[in-house]
Amino acid sequence: MTQGVVVEKSAAPVGVEIKGVDLSQDISPKTFCDIESAFNEHSVIVFRDQTITPEQQLAFSDRFGALEINAFSKYALPNHPGILKVSNIKENGVDIGFSDAGSHWHSDMSYTAHPPRCTILHAIEVPSSNGVILGDTLFASTGAAYDSLSDSLKSRIEGRVAVHQFSAKERGVKAPLKLSQAQIDKHPDVRHPVARTHPYTGRKCLYVRQGECVAIDGMADEEAIALIKYLSDLCVEERFIYRHKWRVGDVLMWDNCALQHIALRDYEWPQRRMMHRTTVGGDVPV
Ligand code: SIN
């Protein structure tokens, strides 16, 4: 079925709402093409008021590329290994989902050789207090941040490669991640360009993050850490940010090359937040 895609821009440099699409229905090649173009151009797209099953989320995600299984697979939705429960909900005192997912600025799984092209969240439960929605997610445009660099800084990072480390000490999460040795062994350090080229638009995007990147090849540690910090702080300046206020039924997807993101932890159990997350594989960053 062809559905009329209407794209409504946010005031930020990234982020649009797509109207006129029901993700529980078949999506024609033409409609999908419009959605994908909007996604590549605007980096964050949101569809409001969606009622979809896990199978429909998986099928929609799969149209963007091969689905990935997250390293924290013990939080997968039962019978759906491709869907990770991102949630603070506890049953009998035990987390039923990955509760610390995204509570620091990052780009998903940059510690892998093929970081994901995009991530899709379906909002199942959204916390609030006295009518105020909590648990917003912020998205920062790494393309706009790159564009803002001086020519001399662009030259300084040209061709530079940063080391991304799965178990980096300063991951910035509230509670230390309890990584098993097996998880750490599965994720050796990887190297990616400090400024990578977007695989669909050709735009240059900063691809470093303090706490995930521990070095820059061929640069003294002190200089590298200072540069990583400078670029990380720049990326998340207010002027580059789209802030998403969740509603139950939102399906939101983001581009892991063109953005860094953070999920705000301004709510506490027994306030409940539950997102179903799918992740689509990506290319080796160049
Ligand atoms: C994530 O980084 O996957 C989580 C984002 C969110 O929960 O809003």
Image (cartoon, rainbow, N blue to C red):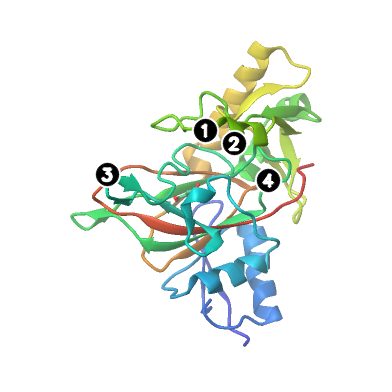
Which numbered disc flags the more N-terminal residue, 3 or 1? 1
- The one nearer the camera, 58 or 77, is 77
Which numbered disc flags the more N-terminal residue, 1 or 4? 4
Please give left or right for residue 164 compared with residue 75 in the image.
right
> For the residues marked 3 and 4, what is the alpha-carbon distance in whole angstroms?
30 Å
Q: Residues within 10 Å of mark 1 (few under 14, many from 20)?
A: few
Q: Quadrant of residue 182?
A: top right
Residue 34 in the image: state x and y as whole percent.
66, 73
Residue 259 in the image: state x and y as whole percent.
59, 46
Which numbered disc flags the more N-terminal residue, 3 or 4? 4
Give the residue displayed 53% in from the left and 29% down from the top. Answer: 233
Quadrant, the C terminus:
top right
Give the residue displayed 51% in from the left and 30% down from the top. Answer: 171
Q: Which residue is mark 1?
A: 179
- Mark 4 vs mark 2, foreground winner is 2
Q: Which residue is mark 4?
A: 115
Callout 3 amino acid: Glu
> For the residues marked 4 and 2, what is the alpha-carbon distance in whole angstroms?
16 Å
